[in-house]
Image (cartoon, rainbow, N blue to C red):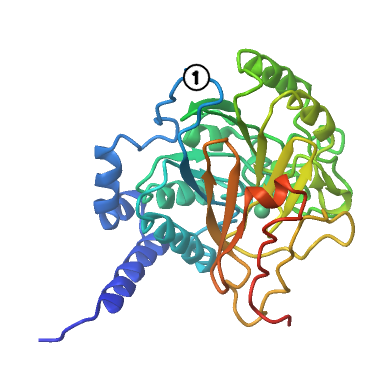
Amino acid sequence: MTIRSVETKYLERREEILRALVNLDRRAFLRVSGAAAAIAATRGIGHAHSFQPVRVDAPGAVEPFRFAYISDSHLYERKLNDRFIRSLLRAVDDVNALDPQPDFVLYGGDLAQLGQPAELDLGAQILKELKAPVKMMVGEHDWYLDLGEKWRSLFGKDVYSFDHKGIHFVVLNSVVEDDFWTVRGLTPMERMKTVAGLDNRSQSNFQVGPPQREWLTKDLEPVSDDTPVIVFSHSPLYHLYQGWNFWTIDAPEVQRILARFRHVTVIHGHTHQLLTNRIKNIHFHGMLSTAWPWPYAPQGLPELTVQMNRPNPFNSQDGCGDGQVLVNAEGLVDKVYNLWNRNVVTVAHEYLESNGVQKRPAAANVATY
Ligand SMILES: [Fe+2]
Ligand SMILES: [Fe+2]
């Protein structure tokens, strides 16, 4: 009898799932990932918004907890490319291995590469393997083929809020653009590809937009100044580098709406790198991508950012990863970057609170290429 190691068995199971994703239909995929799906079903976490909000009874009282994040997987259709599928599966494994499990997992947007139904279905199927509940956020790559129709059918609302253990959470759609396509008669795919090319200058910059800012103001009305607020946005909610759409036009207005709160944290995707900033009362943290790391913008890099070195071009997962957010009793956060090819980097709340004087994070430990 052949004895197979745990690692061999693990790799065989991964191959089985990948073969199912590449060759088979949804039913077959669910059969191979049946165990995980069954766990999800028994816990009632099949739907992204099945997570039960907890009302904030005592403003300012936070029960420390953690949540995990996965972001920017940019999945192609399964017959075209399985590299990014493997990366997302790796992130799902990382999060499922956390002990104890996180309270929930934030998915930070850009699940798909070109917003195609097959890409989004594939992403939804893989995310169902997560044991913890998932909070979804939209990115521009998910949105501009059909203006969110497919994404909403899978994941529900793109803008919402919830309360959890003393924190008020807000999820925004920060990738709203002015209509540049109608007047030019673009097809849906031409529109999608224009937005996907970040530096083509033939589109407007991202914004949250007036209707959503009005919604945010109303949503925050009953929330006391002492209640810590954590905002999820796909693009950074500040002006970083306009040429690459690392930019949200109306970020200053959104920051003004958030100005009265004692502690505000914004967790964003889109930039695919270690990124740290503080503007007045707001702490900003970028998320890693599972697909690829962007280079740093040539100007505008926030002073608090401890850069990761240029990734190893011979390792496609270097500079990628996932991570966790540890929320403390004050409602401040330590941001943990789980870089797959490097040391784990933690950006502690003290570092931002002291404007870079205390607890400077260690640099990611791979030499520059
Ligand atoms: Fe992205
Ligand atoms: Fe993006």
Most foreground residue, 306 or 106: 306
Query: Number of labelled discs?
Result: 1
Mark 1 residue crowding within 10 angstroms, few (<14) / some (14–19) / many (20+)? few
Most foreground residue, 70 or 138: 70
Name the residue at 75% across, 44% down: 191
Q: Position of residue 272 (x, y in %)?
A: 67, 58
Identity of the residue furthest to the bottom in this view? 1
Q: Which residue is mark 1?
A: 58
Examine the image and state in which quarter residue 268 appears.
top right
Q: Position of residue 229 (x, y in %)?
A: 62, 30
Q: Secondary structure at mark 1?
A: loop
Name the residue at 72% across, 63% down: 294
Residue type (three-letter) at the residue carrying disc 1: Ala
Most foreground residue, 316 or 331: 331
Q: Position of residue 25 (x, y in %)?
A: 36, 53
Name the residue at 52% across, 37% down: 329
Identity of the residue furthest to the left in this view? 1
Of the 4 image quadrants, the one containing the N terminus is bottom left
Q: Position of residue 254 (x, y in %)?
A: 77, 29
Of the 4 image quadrants, the one containing the C terminus is bottom right
181 displayed left or right of 214? right
